[in-house]
Image (cartoon, grey):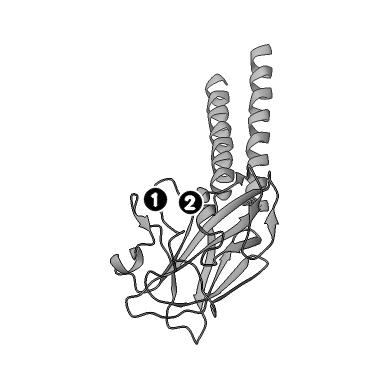
Amino acid sequence: MTCSTSAWRTATIGLAALAISSVASAAQAKIVAVGAFPDSQFGLTVQTPSPGTTVTADFIENNHLPDGIAFAEQHDVALSKPLALDTGGTLAAGTVVSSYFVGFDDPVGGFAHVFATFDAPVLGIEYLDGGNLGPSDFLGLPSLTYNTGCANCGYEAGDTVSFSGDTATFSPNFSQPGDYARVITAASVPEPATWAMLILGLGAVGVAIRRRRVVLAA
C-alpha cells in the first residue's frame, strides 16, 4: 500500500506541475495568425530576430527576409506611467499590456496590406514617424537593440493602420530605412481548457495528500 500511495502521489504532483506549466506557457504573448490581402506586394512572417540584432537599420533587408516580420516582445507588463498611443488614446498607469513589433523594409520599396491576429484584444498601435514608437521601446525585447526613433522609421502620410478586436491591419508604402509599428494588446489570458487542467491538477494533489494522511493514520 505504501508503494501504491507513493506512486499515486508522484503521479498527481506531476499532473499538477504540468498544469501549472501549461498555464504559464498559455500566458505568453502570442501571434495567432498573419496574412496578406490580394493587393499586397509583401506578406508578413512571424520571426524573432537573433539576440544582438539592431531593430531597424535595414535589419529585414540585411537578413534577406522576403516579407515583413512580426514578433512578440514583452508580455504582461504593468505600465509604470501612462502610455500615449498613436491610435487608441492613452493607457493609464497600472494597465497590464503585451507588446508586438511589426516591420517592413525592402531596398526597392513597395506596398504591404497585411493583418496580424493576437491572443488578446488590441488596445492601440504606435506607428507614426516622430510619434510614440521610439518612446515605447521599453516594451521591446531586452535581447535586441532598438532604434525606432530614427527619422522615417515610422509610418508617413498615406500609410494607415487600424485595429478591431484582436486583429490589427497595416497598409504602409515603405522604403529604406523601413516602416515599423508596435502593437499593444491587453494581457494574455489562458484558455478555459488550461484553467480546467490547472484545477484538475491541484485537485489531484489535494486527493493525494488526503490519501497519505489516511494511510499514516492506519
* Contact between labelled residues 1 and 2, with CB atoms less than 8 Å apart: yes
The residue to which callout 1 is attached is 144
The image quadrant that residue 23 belongs to is: top right
Query: 94 or 197, which lies in front?
Result: 94
Confirm whether residue 218 shows in the render: no
Q: Residue at x 63, y 27 (%)?
A: 208
Q: Is residue 25 above or below residue 157?
A: above
| Spot occupied by residue 34 in the image (x, y as percentages of width and height) | 51, 70
| Spot occupied by residue 125 in the image (x, y as percentages of width and height) | 59, 63
Q: Tag 1: residue type?
A: Leu
The residue to which callout 2 is attached is 140
Q: Tag 2: residue type?
A: Gly
Horizontally, residue 24 falls left or right of residue 94, namely left
Q: Is residue 79 above or below residue 208?
A: below
Judged from this view, the residue extending furthest toward the bottom is 39
Query: 90 or 38, which lies in front?
Result: 90
The quadrant of the rendering that contains the N terminus is top right
Q: Secondary structure at mark 2?
A: loop
